[in-house]
Amino acid sequence: EVQLVESGGGLVQPGRSMKLSCAASGFTFSNYGMAWVRQAPTKGLEWVATISYDGSSTYYRDSVKGRFTISRDNAKSTLYLQMNSLRSEDTATYYCTRDQYYSGDFNWFAYWGQGTLVTVSS
Amino acid sequence: DIQMTQSPASLSASLGETVTIECRASEDIYSNLAWYQQKPGNSPQLLIYDANSLADGVPSRFSGSGSGTQYSLKINSLQSEDVASYFCQQYNNYPPWTFGGGTKLELK
């Protein structure tokens, strides 16, 4: 069974940093593209960043480019999101997601974790 | 960027009713569309991909259709467990992968 478990969320002041982790199990992590999707309180879904199965390619939404870094450790089956210079508008639940297919282009978000809440406030 | 517009934003329906949710893309997305269900307090779950393919374990009362820029999600014989928010998402042209604004479905 595919399991994605996020951690690292919490309250952080504007301008500070936070690192999210996502522990994956139930599948061969190194074979799949991964992504972060966020959801502000009572709002819709917003794609944040994607990383290819081998980490060679990364993509970011414009609003986080230069501030957020997605990375992965295939030996530890763990996905990360380093978030710097946090803003109030980054407040959201962050979901770790997995692509559907083995080593392909990332298309839809087939599996989701339970999410971790990041609150940016002074 | 491809914009995804969902309608209605909310709807109320009775048990057993058939419900349809629409999703319009700002350009042709060639059926590269997924639908997600998010029950209150839960993570989103994949319902449909490639516009009309049911994900594993999804009840057959759910169906997707459409082409070009216009797509729809239909729920036949509405059940109480279908109360949720529904989101469409395009993957034809990325980044960014983009979602519709969502439709909140409630029971009448």
Image (cartoon, grey):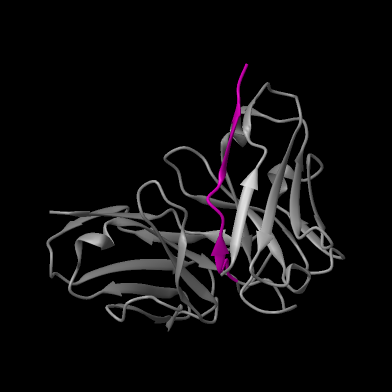
In the image, taking residue A49 as reference, residue A113 lies left or right, namely left
| Residue A19: x %, y % from top left | 75, 39
Q: Where are the magenta residues, as a range?
A: A108-122
| Residue B51: x %, y % from top left | 46, 79
| Residue B81: x %, y % from top left | 26, 61
In the image, taking residue A117 as reference, residue A87 lies left or right, namely right
Identify which residue, B66 or A121, lies in the foreground: A121
Q: Quadrant of the C terminus of chain B?
A: bottom left
Specify the quadrant of the image occupied by residue A3.
bottom right
Residue displayed at 13% across by 70% down: B16
Farthest residue, direction right? A56
Is A121 rendered above or below residue B1?
above
Q: Quadrant of the N terminus of chain B?
A: bottom right
Identify which residue, B23 or A47, lies in the foreground: A47
Is A90 rendered above or below residue A77?
above
Specify the quadrant of the image occupied by residue A103.
bottom right
* Residue A56, magenta (yes or no): no
Identify which residue, A78 or A118, lies in the foreground: A78
Residue displayed at 57% across by 60% down: B98
Specify the quadrant of the image occupied by residue A67.
top right
